[in-house]
Amino acid sequence: MNKNALRGFAVSGLLVMGLTACGGAGTSTDAASAPASETAAPTPTPTPAKDFTLEELNTVLGQIKDKQGTRLSVTSSADLSGSMEQTKALMSQIDVQPAVCKDMAMGSMAQPMDGMKAAVGVSQDAASASVTTISLGAGLGDDAKTKVEASSDQLAQCSTMTMSGPTGASTLTVTDLAGKKPANAMVAYRMDTELPTGEKGSVIMAQTVKQNVVITTVGVGGGSEEAALANVNNLLDQAVELIK
């Protein structure tokens, strides 16, 4: 896959939105059968997660540095709105099989953007011909973790996909990197793509949730999978530390 195509895929992958489920409180049969004289301890009220503003997301990304010590180039969803709509229109012409894997194959382009606030940071290393990106997405409330977890469950089902469009069919192969993923990541995988022209390329993605902020890091290019993972890990760990 050529560099421009990979960069475009990386930016779309960056904005993948994860939503998490809230677990309901179970019913305790022990408490129901306890003697009347005993008073059950009050259930602590969970502290609501902070609703981060777009400005706060930009501030977090503005503090992150890549492995060369350089600050990221930061763009917000407000700046990306026009290009995102154009990309969505293009993606609507693409068919993915198995159909259940469309979200994973197409990244955030398959997802609704309503109510989503997102900021994107990009690091480019000319020496290694690599691009590493990170996105922070907020505004989705307590659902922020479910879809990240769902993508982890989908890895086996979507290990091989076909993506067909006006220019032909591409083959996508997904490899679970659970054994190599960053300590702070909920899910990490490598997606290898073979274009109709025979060109090939790889994208590495790691994702987690902190304070209902979806953190997605993507690595493209570079000398090796290990190097791309190190770059992804570096950005993700900094974001997890800074989001409080």
Image (cartoon, rainbow, N blue to C red):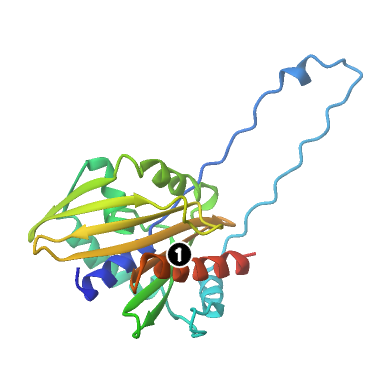
The quarter holding residue 241 reads bottom right
| In the image: residue 156, left or right of residue 24 | left
Residue 42 against residue 19 in the figure, above or below: above
Quarter of the rendering containing residue 13? bottom left
- Tell me what residue is drawn at x 39 percent, y 46 percent: 151
170 lies left or right of 235: left
Question: Residue sitting at 26 percent across and 58 percent down?
Answer: 192
Residue shown at 48% from the left, 56% from the top: 181
Instruction: Name the one closer to the observer, 126 or 91.
Output: 126
Residue 204 horizontal/vertical position (percent): 36, 62
Which element type, helix, strand or loop, lies under badge 1? strand
Where is mark 1, residue-wise?
A: 117
Q: Quadrant of the C terminus?
A: bottom right
Q: Position of residue 208 (x, y in %)?
A: 50, 56
Image coordinates of residue 6 in percent, x first then y, are 26, 69
Q: Is residue 69 above or below residue 38?
A: below
Q: Quadrant of the image for the N terminus?
A: bottom left
